[in-house]
Amino acid sequence: MPHKIPESVLVVIHTADLDVLLIERADRPGFWQSVTGSLDRIDEPLPDTAARELFEETGIVADGEAIRLHDWHLANVYEIYETWRHRYAPGVIHNTEHVFSVCVPRDIPIKLSPREHVRYAWLPLLEAADRCFSSSNAEAILQLPRHFEKRP
């Protein structure tokens, strides 16, 4: 199996009222997060990665009209948890994560990928940030009000 590329996306899914969707990892019960995922290939455009991961992990299709990804033009560099370093090339210990968000209707159907996630929950912003195991994910959720523009 090829090594994972140490560049990824984080997609914060939320409603217009800033409730946030979190998903629980299948391989780590109790680890809640937003949609995340690495580039499939080094030249994959970040918006394509974000749209692909959004669909793979939740079934939500970013159509560019009703469901539009918002690129925050923000990148977090963090140390990869030791538990997951075996997925990367030897010596790779940092990942660069690019932040996106997407506003969806609260009643949008969610279809989890069972090999990746087992449950989902809609939570108020602060509760969602508290539940995330990743500090960069929690921080992105807390920054959501600054990045969300309510559209008429």
Image (cartoon, rainbow, N blue to C red):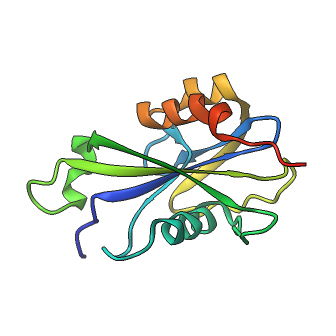
Residue 25, position as x, y percentages in the image: 51, 48
Residue 8, position as x, y percentages in the image: 39, 57
Q: Residue furthest left?
A: 91
Residue 90, position as x, y percentages in the image: 9, 59
Residue 109, position as x, y percentages in the image: 81, 60
Place residue 77 in its image quadrant.
Answer: top left
- Quick one: 65 or 18, which is closer to the camera? 65
In the picture shown, does residue 35 fall above or below 68? above
Q: Is residue 112 left or right of residue 115?
A: right
In the picture shown, does residue 26 fall above or below 51? above
In this rendering, the count of numbered labels is 0
Residue at 84% in and 51% down: 105
Residue at 49% in and 68% down: 49
Q: Is residue 67 left or right of residue 93?
A: right
- Quick one: 142 or 83, which is closer to the camera? 142
Place residue 80 in its image quadrant.
Answer: top left
Residue at 65% in and 22% down: 126
Position of the N terminus by quadrant: bottom left
Residue at 49% in and 30% down: 139
